[in-house]
Image: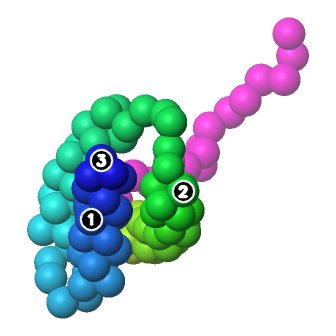
Amino acid sequence: MGRLHELYKITMQMVKVLKNTEETSRDKTIDTMNQLIEERDQVIANIKAPYSEEEMKIGQQVVKLNEQIKVNMDKLYENVKSDMKKIKQQKKLNRTYINPYGPIKTTDGMYVDNKQ
């Protein structure tokens, strides 16, 4: 009985952490989620059949919570991805500002012989 209750408890912690992402820093949220995922993996590894009726109900609730977690994790991933893209563009703009003639490739004055 306790094995699925532990899984349910950790899953609920994951949901709460993802809901409070706006209130805490994103780095702290990611670190906390990594810890909870590791704990949860250990608990899942210890869960084996047969299951009682109550355990089946808890398992169904955990599956529903997993769907919420997946949606929230996807949002977090997209936010991180867009921030990385913005930083990459900013670096490119900074380099262009510092050295405006650096990455320009022109073909002016170049002769190309088409004969073989």
| Between marks 2 and 3 in the image, the one whose residue lies nearer the viewer | 2
Closer to the N terminus: mark 2 or mark 1?
1
The front one of 24 and 10 is 10
Q: CA distance from mark 1 to mark 3?
A: 10 Å
Q: Which of the labelled discs sits on residue 70, or is there none?
A: none
Residue at (33, 51) in percent of width and height? 1
The crowd level at tag 1 (other Cα within 10 Å; few <14, some 14-19, many 20+) is: few
Q: Residue at left 32%, top 83%?
A: 19
Please indicate whether residue 93 sits to the left or right of residue 115 in the image.
left
Q: Is residue 4 visible?
A: yes
Q: How is the image coloured?
A: rainbow
Q: Is residue 91 magenta?
A: no
Under mark 1, the amino acid is: Lys
Residue 53, numbered circle = 2
Can you say whether 15 is above or below 103 in the image?
below
Q: Which mark is residue 9?
A: 1
Residue 6 placement, left or right of 86: left
Q: Residue at x 48, y 61 (%)?
A: 54
Residue 21 falls in image quadrant: bottom left
- Dot 1 or dot 3: first in sequence order is 3
What's the residue type where badge 2 is placed? Glu
Q: Secondary structure at mark 1?
A: helix
**Mark identifier at residue 3:** 3
Q: As displayed, is residue 61 above or below residue 3?
A: below
Span highlighted in magenta in the image: 98-116
Q: What separation in Å lies between label 2 and label 3 (alpha carbons)? A: 14 Å
Q: What separation in Å lies between label 2 and label 1 (alpha carbons)?
A: 18 Å
